Amino acid sequence: MARLNWGLIGGGAGSQIGPAHRLGAGLDGFFNLSAGAFDIDPDKSRDFGATLDVDASRAYGTWQDMLAAESARSSEEGRLDLVTVATPNSTHFEITKAFLEAGFHVLCEKPMTMTVEEAEQVVAAANASGKICAVNYGYSGYPMVRHMRAMVARGDIGKVRMVKAEFAHGFHADAADADNPRVRWRYDPAQIGVSAQFADCGIHAMHLASFVTGQEVEKLSADFVSTIASRQLEDDAMVNFRMDGGAAGRLWTSSIAVGRMHGLTLQVFGETGGLRWAQEQPNQVYYTPISEPVTRVLERGGPGLSPEADRASRVTIGHAEGMPLAFANIYSDLAEVIRADKEGRAADPAATHFPSAVDGLRSMAAVFASVKSAKADGVWVDARPPSLKG
């Protein structure tokens, strides 16, 4: 089976996220890195492409050059099947929209855009082009997260009553580090937008809450705190929310939680049972039926799991699977859906739940609703984007 042609924008030398994308896209042999614009500096971009064995004619100096040249290619000439946008947040909208309008499938890093209005335009562009626009909420690629989703969907814990999500770390807790350029930009509205910690980490936790429960956030109440005086934006946030299926939610996200490392956890409580998962121990889901006195530990790779979990498991039981493998599951999903379209067949249903532009839009709406609520001392605010109200 021929590999699909993949292009990467951003993710060059020194990038934090670039290696995870390259590992994820290449793991299964579904994609070949065929083209890229890897750095804002054209020479560095071309040089980095050479280190990845990208043909010199397709290692571009700018994403605009890449768009023009790759748009002119036919399928026989190796036209790109998927483009990943892994650039700074403020550039996501322009690049993603341009490649969608040129007829390319796109996987965009989160946040998809900087405003709700931009996100609405991306959704419209994806719909108009008929192309996939996925958003890299990569934690939804973990096998046991997918198993939780399947358990909720088949009614194993009954109707969901409450969701508790956290994404808290302590790596920005030192006030003496506040002027470090690698930290300071994250709290600068000119570079990050209207929200810092919630837009960076909180929306991952909120997306997982929706992904697992199958419910969307309708309204929310937020409390934002800037615990270090020099910061213009929040470094800790608490968000209460209500979902369209009746569940209530609690979300805490922080960058000043000293002693917490990554801190992404999700708990789901239903009428007949509860589930718990932590990203730092991703192989286990803790399942407690209401009728039993003990908690069951469900192991990734073990017997009796859902097809969604089995499809996403890659190594034998007892061996940890990390973030790049979760990313690989997103890429595997996209490869299956793209191939199915090329071959005129139905895609594997287990591959169709990757985060979409609509998820990116909902996240942007939640960010702006949270900011509005926090400024109004926690007043409840409609968290739905305009196009999805009623």
Image (cartoon, rainbow, N blue to C red):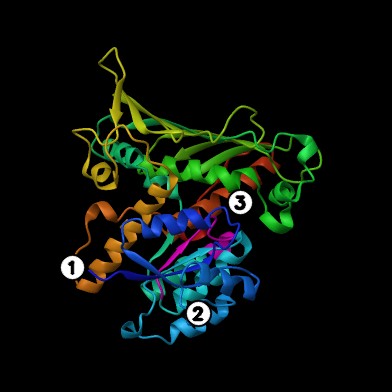
Please, what secondary structure does the residue beneath circle 1 have? loop
Give the crowd class for mark 1: few <14, some 14-19, many >=20 residues within 10 Å. Answer: few
The Cα atoms of the two marked residues, 1 and 3, are separated by 40 Å
Question: Closer to the camera, 205 or 280?
Answer: 280
Asked whether disc 3 touches disc 2, contact meaning CB atoms under 8 Å apart, the reply is: no
Is the C terminus in the top left, top right, bottom left or bottom right quadrant?
Answer: bottom left
The x, y position of residue 57, in whole percent, is 49, 82
> Which residue, given by chain and number where applicable, does mark 3 sit on?
368
Q: Earlier in the sequence, mark 1 or mark 3?
A: 1
Q: Please give the name of the residue rendered at 29% of the width and 38% of the height, measured from the top-left corner.
A: 147
| Amino acid on which disc 3 is placed | Phe
Crowding around mark 3 (Cα neighbors within 10 Å: few <14, some 14 to 19, many 20+) is many
> Dot 2: within a 10 Å radius of its alpha carbon, few (fewer than 14), some, or many (20 or more) residues?
few
- Up/down of 107 relative to 297, above or below: below
Residue 56 marker: 2
Asked if one can make out residue 348 in the rendered structure from this viewpoint, the answer is yes
Q: Name the kind of residue labelled 1 in the image.
A: Arg
Q: Where does the magenta region start and end?
A: 104-119
Instruction: Single out the mark in the foreground, 1 or 3.
Output: 1
Q: Is residue 387 magenta?
A: no
For label 3, the SS is helix
Residue 154 percent location from the top left of the image: 23, 38
The image quarter in which residue 47 lies? bottom right
Amino acid carrying label 2: it is Ala
